[in-house]
Amino acid sequence: MSGNKDFTHLDLYTIVQKEKMDSSSTKLVIYAPDVAAKVKAGQFLIIKTHETSERFPLTFSDWNTQDGTITVLFREVGFSTIELGQLKVGEKIQALVGPLGNPSEIHNYGTVVMACGGLGVAAAYPISRALKEAGNNVITLLGAKNKDSFVLEKEIQKVSTKVMYVTDDGSKGKKGFVSDLLRELIDNKEQIDIVFVIGTPAMMMVTSEVTRPFSIKTVASLTSIMVDGMGMCGACRVTIDGQIKFACVDGPEFDSHKADFKELMQRSKCYRDEEKQAIHEGESCQCQNL
């Protein structure tokens, strides 16, 4: 959003803009001047939609200190994100805590590859912007199911020296995976000083294995089960180089070559049955209210 908008008459955490990015992805701009004033690239927030809702994390995809707004972009796949996506402009989020987590380490590395799978581009955008402002040559690799599933393309193009596309069905760019594009760059002797990888645990694991034989520093943004987001509950534990770390306070970014992705993927399935039940009960309630 552009600056110079006056939202000071609104309550904190009021939604001031809502946009459907595709069939299942939603962008919300939220009035949160206390948060917008402090957020840095790579950090996240914890949202609680209603009084009885669960807390869950979302990464910042943008913010505007002049307007006092923050932007989140999410896919409506679970009960909590579906519930958040049902809010309308003018409605208020019950609770919002952030910024949380450690900011990305932004330096002038030289040539940076930003490898993004799906909606990982939302978290990647502010990091890429900060890296470009630091003087880096940013190459962005974008992967999605098909040509209609890409979001924030114009924004990413502005902060990238080069953007490469790959899709599952080959409808845009090459057919394949982000890891294939990264391997192509390495095979073509492209100078790569560091790789940031953001996507599903499986995507990050596979992509990280491409850089391992070449000892290219690779940083992964690890999303895990989170409750309090402040390191007290221990729900977001991840194993890094054989040691237990908490994604919320020690991360969310870690050396991907040291991360136990298999454990992370296994833990992410812990509440799959409960999530299905919550979605089913939510749909039943909506039908009763029609």
Image (tube, rainbow, N blue to C red):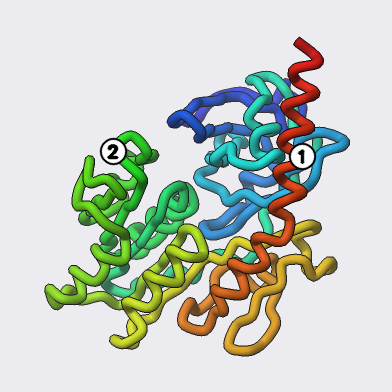
Quadrant (top left/top right/bottom left/bottom right) for the C terminus: top right
Q: Which residue is drawn at 55% across and 36% down?
A: 66
Total labels: the figure holds: 2
Residue 51 rendering spot, x and y as whole percentages: 87, 35
Task: In this rendered view, identify the residue nearer to me: 282 or 24.
Answer: 282
Residue 150 rendering spot, x and y as whole percentages: 35, 40
Report whether 97 appears left or right of 250.
right
Residue mark closest to the camera, 1 vs 2: 1
Residue 180 rendering spot, x and y as whole percentages: 26, 65
Q: Which residue is drawn at 21% across and 55% down?
A: 162
Report whether 94 appears left or right of 14.
right
According to the picture, the residue beneath numbered tag 1 turns out to be: 278
Secondary structure at numbered mark 1: helix
Q: Residue type at mark 2?
A: Lys
Per the model, the C-alpha gap separating discs 1 and 2 is 31 Å
Secondary structure at numbered mark 2: helix
Q: Which residue is drawn at 63% across and 68% down?
A: 266
Q: For the view shown, which residue lies furthest in the right direction? A: 52
Q: For the view shown, which residue lies furthest in the left direction? A: 188
Residue 146 rendering spot, x and y as whole percentages: 31, 41
According to the picture, the residue beneath numbered tag 2 turns out to be: 147
Task: In this rendered view, identify the residue nearer to me: 257 or 140.
Answer: 257
Q: Residues within 10 Å of mark 2 (few under 14, many from 20)?
A: some
